[in-house]
Amino acid sequence: MSTDAADRPADAFLGLLDQPVYVVTAEADGTRAGCLVGFGSQCSIRPLRFAVWLSPENRTHRVACRAFALGVHLLPPDDAGRALATLFGGSSGDDIDKFSRASWHLGPYGVPVLTGAAAWFVGRVVGRAEGGDHTAFLLEPVTGGGAALLPLSVLDQRAVARVDPGHPA
């Protein structure tokens, strides 16, 4: 982030946030993909909706555009969670098969579900919207799991600040 607030007026506000990170997974036409995502949030109560924002630079975006549903995973703030964040955020699916390096199982609609997630859900894609340099995928959650241990603590953006993106910026 810029240190000069005049460059980007919202930087002072945004610098105070430390939101969770997610790993989003997708499957379409036999192709799996997944990436680390810093932008995601519940965006409706009735009906329940969650939006995740993917960069078009990312292979996961290309697969997600053809997918019926996406998986959204919260990671634990331990070494295993950081390893998943590094795998899914610091490497490109164009170069490696991330799923050969992570424990996962087949979820609803063929979506890969990471077994190391603190919590996860699979959501049906009900809409998309372009927004700057990312695309919002609007999801209708259909099933999920995890988070058996409360209070739940999850990996956040500050914890993964040193992960270099696996795709060009």
Image (cartoon, helix red, strand yellow):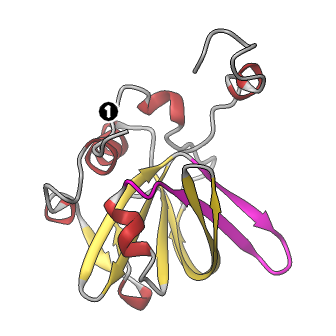
Q: Is residue 49 above or below residue 13?
A: below
Which residue, as the protein is rendered here, is positioned at the far right? 46
Which residue is rendered at x = 25% and y = 79% of the image? Answer: 31
Which residue is rendered at x = 71% and y = 29% of the image? Answer: 14
User: Residue 116 at what x, y percent from top left?
Assistant: 34, 58
Q: Secondary structure at mark 1?
A: loop
What is the number of callouts on the image? 1
Q: Is residue 7 above or below residue 107?
A: above
Q: Residue 115, can we see it?
A: no
Q: Residue 74, can we see it?
A: yes
Q: Quadrant of residue 29?
A: bottom left
Considering the image in quadrants, where does the N terminus appear? Answer: top right
Whether residue 88 appears in magenta in the rendering, the answer is: no
Which residue is rendered at x = 49% and y = 82% of the image? Answer: 69
User: Residue 81 at what x, y percent from top left?
Assistant: 37, 45
Residue segment shown in magenta? 39-57
User: Alpha-carbon neighbours of circle 1 within 10 Å: few (<14), some, or many (≥20)?
Assistant: few
User: Residue 153 at what x, y percent from top left?
Assistant: 56, 43
User: Residue 12 at what x, y percent from top left?
Assistant: 75, 19
Q: Is residue 123 above or below residue 86?
A: below
| Viewer-nearest residue: 14 or 85 | 14
Left or right for 136, reference 22: right
Q: Quadrant of residue 149?
A: bottom right
Considering the image in quadrants, where does the C terminus appear? Answer: top left
Report the residue marked by disc 1. 164
Whether residue 40 appears in magenta in the rendering, the answer is: yes
Q: Mark 1 belongs to which amino acid?
A: Asp
| Viewer-nearest residue: 59 or 114 | 59
